[in-house]
Image (tube, grey):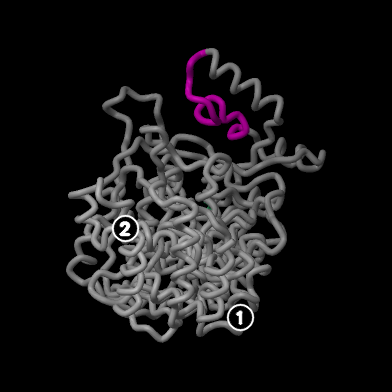
Amino acid sequence: MDYNKLAELLFPHIDKTPEDYEAMFPQRNLPEGAMVTRLGPSPTGFIHLGNLYGAFVDERLAHQSGGTFFLRIEDTDDKRYVEGAVEAIISSLKFFDINFDEGALLDGDMGEYGPYYQSKRGEIYQCFVKKLVSEGLAYPCFLTEEELAAIREDQEANKETTGIYGKYAVSRNLTIEEIEANIAAGKPYVVRLKSTGNHDLPSEEIRYIKVQDAIRGELSMPENNQDVIILKATGIPTYHFAHVIDDYFMRTTHVVRGEEWLMSLPIHVELFEKLGFEMPTYCHTAVLMKLDEGNKRKLSKRKDPELSLDYYRQEGYHPQAVKEYLLTILNSNFEEWRIDNPDAPIDDFKFTTEKMSSGGALFDLNKLNDISKDVLVKIPAAELTKFMTEWAREFAPEKLSLFEGHEEYIEKILDLGRDGNKPRKDLVYAKQIFEFISYFFDDYFKIEDTIPENVSDEDAVAILTKYLETYNHSDDQSQWFDKVREIGTEMGYAAKPKDFKKHPEDYKGHVGHVSTVIRIALMGRSQSPDIWEIQQILGEERTRERIGALIV
Ligand code: GLU
């Protein structure tokens, strides 16, 4: 067969040569050891934790090494294209401080290795499919859906591997005249790789590919033997082919992708070999799992809202907390490093693929919340105030007016109990923080808890009445507490909890019960930070109003 003739027959419109592309996309001029990584999301509109997890690895590898991190949009499947998805990807990742140096950016493509949308790279792919055809390494396949289904049925019945290979690859044997006739008759066709892998061999003779994965170490898998589709009937490449062409010509050095792609690695190895391209280093990341009633399972789009990145923004997780948490699941030595370097910026940590686990990475919201508490306690109140305001602007606009223009008030609230050597760690994420501090806002203030059992309703009213009578907003903390204690002892409550514990029969309760009554009147809750400090923030008028409201 004259393969050159076949190549011209299939791709008469392709006039560039492989050499042209080599010249257009030369090796990058980067310092020794600099890594080039990419994120290749499909624009489906759903951005998940896995994307962030991968992006984070990409970003660290590139930026730690003085390399480049670019965004390529894998939009060859246009059924899944969702308007605005690219903006959403960029802005979601930016929120987590992950920025691209190159690629499909908001103002269009930026960089010398584009186009960065696969849908615009048709000619490049076809040039290399043409090359493979002209070398007898790829061929058009005219099998119809029905024929493919019949082959599959046969294979399943005979318990054989399904797919097009060996004797099933019937289009391999077509003559050029037959192909010409099929094309003239308008029959649709795909282009398949003519695989040279062979599995019809005694098992000891099957060839294995060996790939050094940066996360998993040496991988050994039977070579590919399937005539996989490289170009669909529409002229659009499959993932396999686009990956190989793009990562070669965009000069990617490290391909970070999910472990779901491991299975097709032998196909990619064969494609790199047949095209004569040098392979990048693969880094296959572990699937994100969660514990569900004691069992590990994959995070699922349907069952787990926390899989979506939007979830973290809507709930108002601080990006630094999410980043810090992701690093703890990404690198086994991160937590230890954090203990040794409690105040170091997160980017000082030297991230390595070797310290990544290849088993399922366990994602645990409780752990994220714990880490978030530690992270937030270190963020200055002024910055947290800004963060809360921005969160409200986007996700809780009805609350925005409580924040905007009241920055000083909010800062004091957020700083409550955070100084000293045992700062309170009750702030976790914006939604929770709002709930936690909601009693500071009159519209949200409500009595949630009940007074202690050992305080009668009459006593409660009497406590509050006396409290209001003796209240002096300029009392300092100890003067204030002396007064509370006095009110209590006058009414038969022990001045110290331990006196009450020793002789419960002598008292109605203790000073703690008295202050709980005040706490509930002011905050509506029996648990809260320091009452005196809260009153200072609420101001005299509001304090008197709230106490007075319960004296009836
Ligand atoms: N478009 C692929 C995906 O959505 C990218 C895989 C890769 O990074 O190679 O999973």
287 lies above or below 317: above
Identify the residue shown where x is 29% and y is 70%.
Answer: 423
> Would you name the residue on which mark 1 appears?
404
| Residue 20 seen in the current view | no
| Residue 409 seen in the current view | yes
Identify the residue shown where x is 17% and y is 69%.
Answer: 340
Identify the residue shown where x is 58% and y is 59%.
Answer: 446
The type of residue carrying mark 2 is: Tyr
Residue 506 falls left or right of residue 134: left
The type of residue carrying mark 1 is: Glu
- In which quadrant will I find the N terminus? top right
Q: Residue furthest right?
A: 185
Q: Position of residue 310 (x, y in %)?
A: 57, 58
Mark 2: secondary structure:
strand
Query: Which of marks 1 and 2 precedes in the sequence?
Result: 1
Of residues 35 and 197, which is closer to you in this image? 35
Of residues 390 and 227, which is closer to you in this image? 390
Q: Position of residue 330 (x, y in %)?
A: 33, 56
**Residue 205 placement: quadrant:** top left
Of residues 335 and 181, which is closer to you in this image? 335
Q: Give the number of the mark in front: 2 or 1.
A: 2
Number of numbered discs on residues: 2
- Is 168 inside the magenta-drawn segment? yes
- Is 412 inside the magenta-drawn segment? no
- In which quadrant will I find the C terminus? bottom right
Ligand 1 has an atom within 8 Å of the beta carbon of the residue at disc 1: no
Identify the residue shown where x is 60% and y is 54%.
Answer: 46
Residue 493's disc number: 2
Magenta-highlighted residues: 158-173
